[in-house]
Image: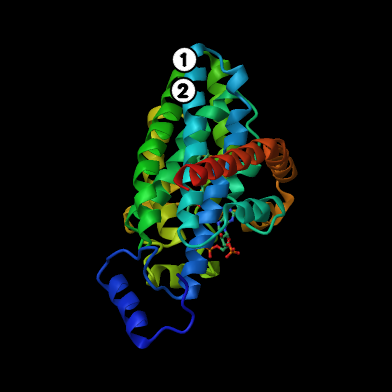
Amino acid sequence: MTATAPDAGLAEQFERTIARDQRVEPRDWMPEKFRATVIRQIAQHAHSEIIGIQPEGNWITRAPSLRRKAILLAKVQDEAGHGLYLYSACETLGADRTDLTERLITGRQKYSSIFNYPALTFADVGVIGWLVDGAAVCNQVPLCRSSYGPYARAMIRICKEESFHQRQGYELLMTMMSGTAGQRAMVQDAVDRWWWPVLMMFGPPDRESANTAQSMAWKIKRHTNDELRQRFVDMTVPQAEALGVTLPDPDLRWNPQRGAHDFGEVDWDEMKQVVAGNGPCNAERIAQRKAAHDGGAWVREAAAAHAAKKAGRERTVHQ
Ligand code: FAQ
């Protein structure tokens, strides 16, 4: 599958595939740096989905009604599914899932900074749906056209499910906003805490993004981090108005010359700290993931023993 010294024909064929907007498939030759970049991005994405279960999963047992509990359970199950899909996409590139999990648990591979913030009230469940999933959809819809085939195809289903996640969050918040003054205050408090961390989900500013230029040239990414952040702000402002909440940015205003909203500077030092492992919940998130992985060892062992037994039986039958 890997070829380190290609003949010129293979490299040309790869370049042609990219230039023609066609998909690179697992069987195709690809530069090792392309393979490594796609593995890095998909693995980080998969880890984010799996770790991303934790802030909301924490609320399943405390959901205020059967309906809210059923919705939240379905959403969390979707996220687990997205993680598994994405690990499978990584495996098509020769990555090993056990190794990827090991890299996550030992801090050698990243996951989205957003999941290192706590979900303090049930309004946070709504805001995670509205803003975190909203940002995820905004970032991931263009990835349905990513140049690596299995990733692009996985994104189509994932985006459909993320849209449902966004809608359930917005609907939850609409309900709370038509409730008591206390409920409205809870929503505003959650928006105040999540707004800036959500803007960090789009990655560092373009001037500091190490990977954007190459990933855009290879069409792994279709837009820069700043382009997508801007798109997200523009689509969210009218939603906030309809909801009746204030986005916590005094510099946020429509700029008719640009045909877009101006907005304040993200605290990039805070983002660097969170990505470096020093956010409010980093240690807790990784400890919980490690405990779940260790606790599942017997399941993996049983599955491997069953598969070996089954293969043995099939060999005997065919002899
Ligand atoms: N947090 O050079 P760039 C979700 C890293 S899924 C942590 O700009 P790139 C669903 C970056 O990896 C959310 N690390 O990198 C859900 C790179 O690492 P390196 C996840 C970050 O790849 C909802 C370094 O910094 N979504 O929310 C962050 O070109 C609710 C330099 O950055 C995806 O993964 C960050 N925020 O652009 C689940 C989408 N930003 O090279 C549960 C796919 C950057 O040091 C509940 N990924 N880094 O190893 C992408 O679109 C891109 O990878 C970006 C980063 C845009 C995230």
Q: Is residue 246 visible?
A: no
Q: Kindly tell me whether mark 2's CB lies below 8 Å from ligand 1.
A: no
| Location of residue 147 in the rendering, given as x and y in whole percent from the top left corner | 35, 63
Residue holding disc 2: 71
Q: Residue at x 70, y 55 (%)?
A: 107
Tag 1 and tag 2, C-beta contact below 8 Å:
yes
Say what amino acid the circle numbered 2 marks.
Ile
Disc number placed over residue 88 in the picture, else none: none
**Vertical order, 2 against 70 (above or below):** below
**Depth order, front residue of 82/61:** 82
Q: Residue at x 58, y 17 (%)?
A: 182
Q: Residue at x 61, y 49 (%)?
A: 113
Structural crowding at the residue carrying mark 2, measured as other residues with C-alpha within 10 Å and reported as few (<14), some (14–19) or many (≥20): some
Residue holding disc 1: 67
Residue at the farthest front position = 319
Q: Residue at x 37, y 29 (%)?
A: 242
**Depth order, front residue of 177/28:** 28
**Vertical order, 69 against 203 (above or below):** above
| Location of residue 116 in the rendering, given as x and y in whole percent from the top left corner | 65, 43
Corner quadrant of residue 276? bottom right
Image quarter of the N terminus: bottom left
Q: Is residue 47 left or right of residue 256?
A: right
| Location of residue 209 in the rendering, given as x and y in whole percent from the top left corner | 53, 67
Q: Is residue 304 visible?
A: yes
- Give the structural element (helix, strand or loop) at label 1: helix
Corner quadrant of residue 143? bottom left
Query: Real-space Cα distance between discs 1 and 2?
Result: 6 Å
